Amino acid sequence: MTDRIRLTTRRRTFLAATAAVGGLQLSSPFIIKARGETPVKIGFIDPITGSLSALAVSEVESAKWTVAQMNKKGGILGRPVELLIEDSANDTGTGVQKAHKLIERDKVDMIMGDVNSGIAYAIMGVTSDKKVFHIVPGGHTDPITGKDCKWNTFRTCNTTAMDAAAVTGELVKRFGKKWFFITPDYAYGQTLQANFVKNLTALGGTWQGDMLPIANTDFSATLIKAKAFKPDVLLNNMGGAAQINCMKQFVQFGMNKEMALGGALFEIESIRSVPKEAQTGWWTMEWYWNQPNVPHVKEFVDAISPAIGGRKPTARHWMAYVSLHAARLAAEKAKSLDAVKMAHALAGLELPPEVALMPGKIQYRAGDHQLMSDIFVGQVHPPGPGGPDDLFTIEATVPGEKAAGPAEATGCKISWPS
Amino acid sequence: MLQLVLFNLTNGLIVGAFYVLMALGLSLIINLSNVVNFAHGNFLAIGGYIAYTLTPYLGFWGALLVSPFLTAIFGFAIEKLMIRHVYARNHIYSLLLTFGLGFILQDACRYIWGPSPLPLGIPDVLSLPLTPDLFFVTWYRVFMVVVVVVAVGGLFALLRYTRVGMRIRAGTLDLDTVSALGVNVAALRSYNFAVGSFLAGLAGVLAAGQIGLNPNMGDDLIMPSFIAIIVGGVGSLTGTLLGGLLIGVAAALTTVFYPAGAEAVIYIIMAIVLLVRPRGLLGEEGMLT
Amino acid sequence: MSTAMTTGRAPGTRAYLQLGIIWALLLTVPAWLPMLGGYTAIAGRVLVFALAAMSFNMLLGFTGVMSFGHAAYFGLGAYGAGLTLKYVAASTPLAILAGTLLGGIAGTLFGLLLVRRRGVYFAMVTIAFGQVCFYIAYKWDSFTGGYDGLRGFLRAPIDLGFTKIDIAGNETLFYFFVLLVFGLAVGLQALILASPFGRTLLAIRENERRARFLGLPVERHIWLSFSISCFFTALAGTLYALLNNFADPLGLNYVMSGNIVMITVMGGMRTFWGPLVGAVLFVMLQDYVSSMTTNWMFFVGTVFVAVVLFFPRGLMGMLQKRSGA
């Protein structure tokens, strides 16, 4: 089977025409297809434009690479894989429209997406309605595998509860139990803070905090309050540009000399774009490229790196990689592309080490369809000897099961179609 | 508590000064040309990104000086190419035009400089706090206020003492008469648009030093500018100045008591002003009908 | 070729022909759309945006007053419908009624503040008010779902007593349901515009000062026109919520307002059916270009600029001009 990248004629003409008009370079082809039999179609929806685009671009470039590799090795069930990428533009309406388009017009066999958990959540509505197998590679909000879980939906990235639980113990152990939270005021932030508070108070800690607008730019008022509270740890739960600005101002105000800084997620894509002095603090990584003792990680990193501009893959690359391979494994175990059979097959299936790329034995557990991946807790630092992406040192590895707690406690009750 | 309030009051003035810079450019164009430039936030981003590109060659200070001029030239060209064609038409066209232009510019920024946020390096001395007690006032913030004061002072002096400035002011009040007196209104509007773009570019460099760069950065800043203008009253630059400072201070003080309401408060102020004094604080009744 | 709708004169053959073609095409969508590579959900989206834009056009095209904040009423309609389905009852008609009332009443009240403003100031205040609504939906987490949007509701089948129409599970039936609502709404709009009230609006559009000298209560008419336009826009919003089975704050954002204006202008703001044509063009453009390239914003923006600079009359406007009416 040859691995060829091609565009359908209609699209090619369109692209040529628009390229000539716009004079802009077009992104690499959206359809990657191997020749031969009827392809297995995978719809991949992500916010390629909008404020989450850096994360989405990582997922998408990894998905393209993964599918190309997969097609070299026989695709899925011996059939070539066709990846159809759609931009949700970080807008829920557009995301849902694209899900309809992929399912109704393109007749995809499965759907992946979205980085924005609100959109992922809305797409779940469409996929469960249409009974289409769905993996959420990177949307964190808890109910996706919690109280609103669905039989057809699996999630690769962690829940906020898992990230919070993993880092709380380490921070308390190392720095103390008096915490100050800076949290974005929407569902993700509120759940995250609630999870932190639950874990912290269980350990006898005390806390204060501010809920701020999601795209807040000026943190001085809140940082003044934080400084007056004299906490052991300042938890920065903001995301994207707000998170970065909060860190910068924290360092500018010299508060890094008085308290530790930490939080749930500080993704490599964000760390790369902050000034050196703000590359600091204690965080969780959902996956990291430098795991010298874990087999297959280096192979993966060396193989994908040339396809993504010579940089090291991030957790987002890993999420897309794992999600696509999980779908392949599920189809192969079920010997079918039927959504119900695939979902039954994937639940509780242990991922082989060349897919997992982690020290532990990980699986999408049957109880809530959440991947029980290892969580890495450690320190962010300016680039070290390992190159520009040597930005994190793993200090502890927390097994997913331990951080997540029992599946029954998430509020998920999976009901299968009769 | 009092200390916290005072801290935030100062801080609000700093944030407000920034809104003023941004809103003045927008206000200037509305007053003379009756065009609400939706792309103003994107001009701001362009100014910031140009500074980012220039910094390795000219340093921060050089970029700060040059970037606003380049943004002004860019604005001048855009006005000549597109915007002047819609002055005579229904307002809906200028809104749509600049709305579409905003899309184009945002995508151009993403295409040229990438989707990820970028930091604009500022000199080390500016990132230090004034004193350990005033830890929250970095020299950069002081510097921002100084630049805003100089820019606003310069703008008012330009409008008061130069020939172009006086014509702009006169044109704001009565364009027909100014035109009848033989002033080239088309050229006047081009220069005026360039001055507005200059202010956006300057605001962009300052914002980039404080909050970094990303292709959508203008979106978050355009609404406070709108509201500063509505609160201050369309047609009055002094009103815009007042409006910007007012919402900056109000937002900062709200942060002390109810942080999540910091954004909401500026909309509440706008609603109150519209109810009590629909023309805005210093707006002229009957302007721009 | 001015239609009966725009002038109130007796419709000519051309107008009947036009009407016939439009409805024939709309009624047969499920038959021909898949052949062109479309899908039924996108046809529903076209109708929703067309209704929103036609409602907006009662204000822009037929009263000569502009608003750049109509997303507010569209979005309030969507939230009204969603909240009703989620918290009150699983009844689609009730949801539509509640959403239409919510958006329409908000618009009516806000219109009171607006009517004395004109021009660019009017537009700015409508934008700002739209952002207030956006802001409330965005912040009121516990009730509206905040940033993530309102979920957890599904459109319910319509119970006619003797039979149930399954618009929930069957996409094609749902399309016809949307088409029915669309047809009733635009029919009503045509009647309003053809009435003496509608002709007064045209008089205001053509020359506000003269209308005032004639002793017409201009402010009251503009207010009524704004209010009616908001009710219809909110109705479109309720259909949007039913189409997607969720409502999100971006539906209230000024970008959505801009899209509604664009659809109207692109199709032709001085024509009755122009916004429908605009909606077809706009939705197709957005759908296809955004699947082709990540630089879709560039293309969409370029189209906006090109329409404003080179085709300000819109497609229908140009066709009418060419046919010499």
Image (cartoon, rainbow, N blue to C red):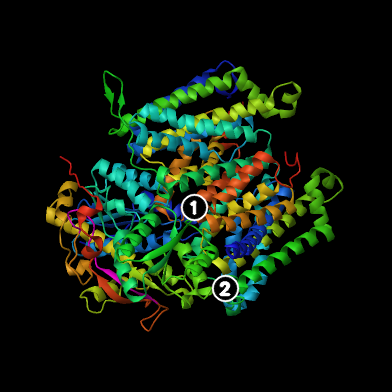
- Frontmost residue, A135 versus A377: A377
Give the residue type that dot 2 points to.
Phe
B249 over C263 or under it: above or below: below
Q: Mark 2 lies on which chain?
A: B
Residue depicted at x 67% and y 71%: B65
Residue at which label 2 appears: B135
- Frontmost residue, B47 versus B145: B145
Residue depicted at x 49% and y 42%: C252
Q: Determine whether the residue tagged by mark 1 lies in a helix, strand or loop.
A: helix
Residue at which label 1 appears: C297
Instruction: State which quarter of the image contains the N terminus of chain A.
Output: bottom left
Instruction: Return the x and y of residue C190 as percentages of the image width and height.
Output: 53, 22
Q: Which of marks 2 and 1 is in front?
A: 2
Outermost residue toward the right in this view: B181
Question: Is residue A106 in view?
Answer: no
Question: Is residue B140 in view?
Answer: yes
